[in-house]
Amino acid sequence: MVKKARLGLYLENEDMKRQIKVAAAKRGISTTEYCTQAIEERLKKEGEASDADEDYKRKVALISRLDKFSKEVGPVKMTAAELIKEGRRR
């Protein structure tokens, strides 16, 4: 499981909070995701985020999907070497 970093966000007024909630709702995403996307876009625009950040995110997402798949499938009861040999026979 991926550990998430927490960031506190204090807004100057309630109106901005409402605007963020409305904008997120229009896109069907959470306010957290909306703010995360906005910050990521800003970081990329200013050259603070690199492609390595995107590669890391893709790897984390892949690992997360593999973990979920592994839980759904359950134990395989074969070693990786045995699975490879089986695949070569087919």
Image (tube, rainbow, N blue to C red):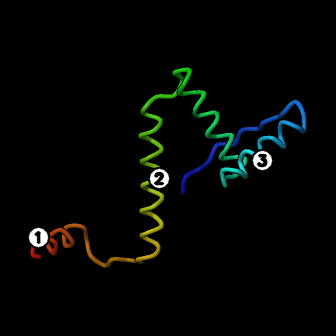
Numbered circles on residues, count? 3
Q: Which residue is mark 1?
A: 88
Neighbour class for label 2 at 10 Å: few (<14), some, many (≥20)? few
- The image shows residue 56, relative to residue 84, as above or below, that is above
Element at badge 2? helix
Q: Which residue is mark 2?
A: 61
- Amino acid type assigned to the residue bearing label 1 in the image: Arg
Nearer mark to the viewer, of 3 and 1: 3
Nearer mark to the viewer, of 3 and 2: 3
Q: CA distance from mark 3 to mark 2?
A: 27 Å
In front of the other: 68 or 47? 47
Q: Residue 7, image x and y in percent?
A: 71, 38
- Residue 76 occupies which quadrant of the picture? bottom left
Q: Quadrant of the N terminus?
A: bottom right
Of all residues, the one furthest to the front in this rendering is: 26
At 48% across and 58% down in the image, what residue appears? 64
Q: Which residue is mark 3?
A: 22
Q: Quadrant of the C terminus?
A: bottom left
At 78% across and 47% down in the image, what residue appears? 21
- The image shows residue 37, relative to residue 78, as above or below, that is above
In front of the other: 24 or 76? 24
- Amino acid type assigned to the residue bearing label 2 in the image: Ala
Numbered mark located on residue 7 in the image? none
Element at badge 1? helix
Q: Residue 78, image x and y in percent?
A: 27, 76
Which numbered disc flags the more N-terminal residue, 2 or 1? 2
Q: CA distance from mark 3 to mark 1?
A: 54 Å
Element at badge 3? helix
